[in-house]
Amino acid sequence: MGSGLLDEDTAAALPEGRRLEGRGVPWRERLFQLGLWASLAVGVVFLASLLVYVVVEAWPRLDLRILTHFPDIIDPSNAGAQSAVMGTIWVIAFTALYCLPTGILTAIYLEEYADPHRWYNRVVEINIQNLAAVPSIVYGILGLGIIARGMGFGQTVLTASLTLSLLVLPTVIIAAREAIRAVPQSIREASLALGATRWQTIRRQVLPAAVPGMATGSILALSRAIGEAAPLLLLGGLAFITFNPSGLDSPFTVLPIQIFNWISQSRAEFISLASAAIVVLLVILLAMNSLAIWLRNHYSHRW
Amino acid sequence: MNMRTPLRRTTAPAAVTAALTAALVPAVSGCGTSGTDASGNGAAARQLSGTVRVDGSSTVAPLTSAAAQLFQGENPGVRVTVGTSGTGGGFEKFCAGETDISDASRPIEDDEKRACADNDITYQQLRIANDGLSVVVNKDNDFAKCLTVEQLRRIWEPGSDIKNWNQVDPDFPDEELELFGPGTDSGTFDYFTETINGEEGASRTDYSPSEDDNVVVQGIAGSRGGMGYFGLSYYEENKDELNVVKIDGGDGCVEPTAQTVQNGTYKPLSRPLFIYPKASSMAKPEVEAFVDYYVENNAEIAEKALFVPLNPQQNTQLKDDLQRLKEQQGS
């Protein structure tokens, strides 16, 4: 409200603002604007054509069979992606379970407790930022070597979700830190001044205020994990699976791997199926991102 | 036999518990297993459960997947996973003890044998089907009856500048060469490039690729100078629209047929496909039942997955090898 009032004031103070803006735009500025639009168009046009292409390709198979049927190598018209959809849900649910608490607690430590002047805290910080840039296939190698073989978990839902947790952990930490940092210092000071302990301040003031930002960042990080095929291909590439996961120790397949598998088949029906599975994946991603946007708009705090 | 009705997912919780129990205690359901009733039909009547892990060649994967699908239709309690790590990647996992069966499009190599021996993994090679590629041209093409491997290589090698049939052989007429083939993701592409160009994935890129073999068929059928390659079973389905080219692999021109692929005289675009079951895994009733089913129904499975089935002699060999595998397990 306050800022709105201020805007009106400024507008009133500059009654000729409109005319100032319209008076002879220099060609350099026009060129710059054109450049801006062109850059915008690259992304939008590319995304739109991708969506149209996928939906057109998928059209013959875009029905409920994709959700209710299991992969069928002999009769494509009887095939669906239920095992992959369920596998994706299982893997992502456990990824969230492992990486969200770890990531958020790490962020609280780094923001609220760690002394940024200590060398070891700086090392941790640099490490996290570098980890966020490591290619996902490297996490696949790590998962295969340490989690699947070293720890003996095999190619299971557990291994996949632990590997994906490691993959998105840096992103979650960075997003959570940003959210915590966005809480004004004055709130903390006020809380401490009223006699609250550091824990009480974090618990009752900082965390509630930072939750929307953390949730948004975490959901976007999980969206990335959903689309990942590379590390999971390395973990087993289990491509033909006609059953839903039954537990953490169960073999699984996920949508990106199922898509990859269908694309390499030699019959046109399988290619449509792959497109239909891409549409399902896009719908899941879109739903998660919408949730993130809704959370941000609905709960975000302004000071 | 009423077990065969596909009541697949109706008893989910029961199946979950059963699968979990079986994974932890593989011996539980195997009280009266060994011996006589292990062959095909007897296995379907018993309620089997557990997981069969298969990995390996991406060429063999469709075959094993078809087997897995048909088998699971009859044994809804068993879960078969078929991975596609490639023949080499499959053996790596197999010899590390991570899989029950390895799919392979070539026999196991010496260093892989050593890796298996180091981990005390014994196995038996089972030739389960035959794979053959056919090189095809337009129906009106009456000159390219036979091509040598060398000619194929000159046409398909990376950077090839052959654009006309008379560049392939001066006796051929002046006819523009239009090439069609599978996309780079397919096992057919890998196999063809490896045998013809000497390196997997090495191919000229200025041809019309399609993951859909029907598109390749249509393309060649619609172009007088068209040429392409795909699995032999695909040519046989489209015999009326295309001509097949005989291949001279050094011993004269041979036409690809089920017989020449089976006996290996069609060179070098034919090969045997193998599965390698682990001897110790055969003690698990679900693995034994799956291998039995696969061997028993190999002709039907090969046909459904569009491969060339075994000839009677190879079939006998397969049964003998399976017997040998079961004897290994006993020792």
Image (cartoon, coloured by chain):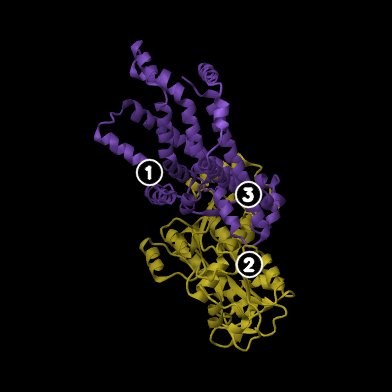
Chain colours: A purple, B yellow
Q: Tag 3: residue type?
A: Ser
Residue A291 % position (x, y): 57, 32
Closer mark to the observer between disc 3 and disc 1: 3
Position of residue B13 measured from the top left corner of the image (x, y, whole percent): 60, 39
The label on residue B302 is 2
Q: Quadrant of the N terminus of chain B?
A: bottom right
- Seen at 57% across and 59% down, the residue is B290
Identify the mark nearer the N-term, 3 or 1.
Answer: 3
Residues flagged by tags 3 and 1 on a common chain: yes
What residue lies at 43% left-to-right and 57% top-to-bottom? B97
Front residue of B141/A272: it is: B141
In-front residue for pair B124/B170: B170
Give the distance between the C-alpha atoms of the residues marked 2 and 3, in whole angstroms.
40 Å
Of circles 2 and 3, the one toward us is: 3
Pointers 2 and 3 within a single chain: no
Residue pointed to by mark 3? A49
Residues B43 and A165: in front is A165
Figure quadrant of the C terminus of chain B: bottom left
The Cα–Cα distance between marks 2 and 1, rounded to whole angstroms, is: 47 Å
Residue depicted at x 49% and y 50%: B27
- State the residue at coordinates (33%, 41%): A127
Q: Is residue A247 visible?
A: no
Report which residue position mark 1 lands on: A131
Q: Which chain is disc 2 placed on?
A: B
